[in-house]
Amino acid sequence: MESKQILLINDLPGYGKVALAAMMPVLAHMGHILYTLPTALVSNTLDYGQFEIMETTEYMKNTLKVWKNLGFHYDAIATGFIVSEEQAQLIAHYCEEQKKQGTLIFTDPIMGDDGKLYNGVTESALMHMKHLTACADVIVPNYTEACLLAGVEYKAEGIDRKSMVELIEKLRQAGSKSIIITSAVVEGQDVVCGYEHKTDSWFMIPFHKIPVRFPGTGDIFSSLVLGHMLHGMPLKDSVKQAMDMVAAVIARNAGNEDKYKGIPLETELDMLK
């Protein structure tokens, strides 16, 4: 399968398999060529409760100027954790420029969970994220983030099918093309829902939640979806394949003593392809 050139814009942890540390090995294993733009250096996964974060906005600004001068181009750009409003504006502008040259924009709008924004994410940052997701070809919000982007009420108990279709339609009206909503409960069932722009088709894929939490599984999921899409697999099939693979590695590592590290990807790449 043909390798694609991908720019990953996300944070880089020193300890733990999340963000760039999770995405790079998966996509490299799938045969893609990777470039990175870290939005922050993070000491360790936040689950430990103590951490240090150094944002890299000035580095990003200077780097993107250099890359523009050098005429760098990619088949796809995948964006993840964005530290500030200034970064969101910077990344949105760069993605819009690259999209004009045919680059696929794949955005994970990391902003919140359980019905609320993460600490440090402001309403202004939400507005800039709406700008970024509006120019994206594929967005991968969780249910909370989808509600925030669409401006609809979050319902902890879950929603019905009609409400999910309406939620996705609002995101489409805001500019997003293809949409994948994770961590949703629809009519009592855990599901991943979405819409594929190319085929004008909706999908809802149920799954059984494994009662174990590892940080970084969302990054692994997004990497697998993007990697398969760039190999020509339809979006729904890419999502289903990614769901099955993530479930398999979670189950295989459920007994790990320190789950805050995330999935030990070096030993799991044989299952992620």
Image (tube, rainbow, N blue to C red):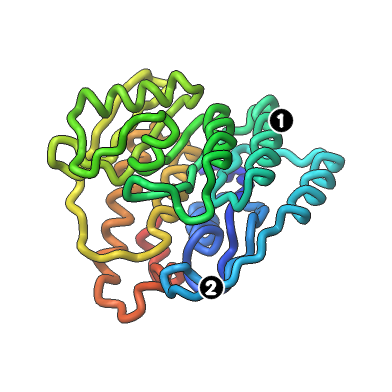
- Residue at the spot 71% in from the left edge and 30% down from the top edge: 97
2 and 1 marks in contact (CB < 8 Å): no
Image side of residue 101 versus residue 19, left or right: right
The percent coordinates of residue 230 (x first, y second) are 51, 39
Image side of residue 33 versus residue 181, left or right: right
Q: Amino acid at mark 2?
A: Phe
Residue 190 visible in rendering: yes
The percent coordinates of residue 108 (x first, y second) are 48, 44
Image side of residue 94 versus residue 32, left or right: right
Q: Which mark is residue 226?
A: none
The percent coordinates of residue 252 (x first, y second) are 26, 69
- Residue at the spot 49% in from the left edge and 53% down from the top edge: 30
- In this view, the residue farthest toward the bottom is 257
Q: Nearer the viewer, residue 183 or 127?
A: 127
- In this view, the residue farthest toward the left is 188
Q: Nearer the viewer, residue 159 or 262?
A: 159
Q: CA distance from mark 2 to mark 1?
A: 34 Å
- Residue at the spot 52% in from the left edge and 39% down from the top edge: 126
N-term-proximal mark, 2 vs 1: 2
Residue 241 visible in rendering: no
The correct choice, above or below, for 73 with respect to 110 in the image is above
Residue 158, image quadrant: top left
Q: Which residue is mark 1?
A: 97
- Residue at the spot 38% in from the left edge and 20% down from the top edge: 199
Q: Which residue is mark 2?
A: 51
The percent coordinates of residue 242 (x first, y second) are 35, 48
Q: In the rendered picture of this protein, how many numbered marks are placed on residues?
A: 2
Q: Amino acid at mark 1?
A: Glu
Residue 251, image quadrant: bottom left
Dot 1 falls on a residue whose secondary structure is helix
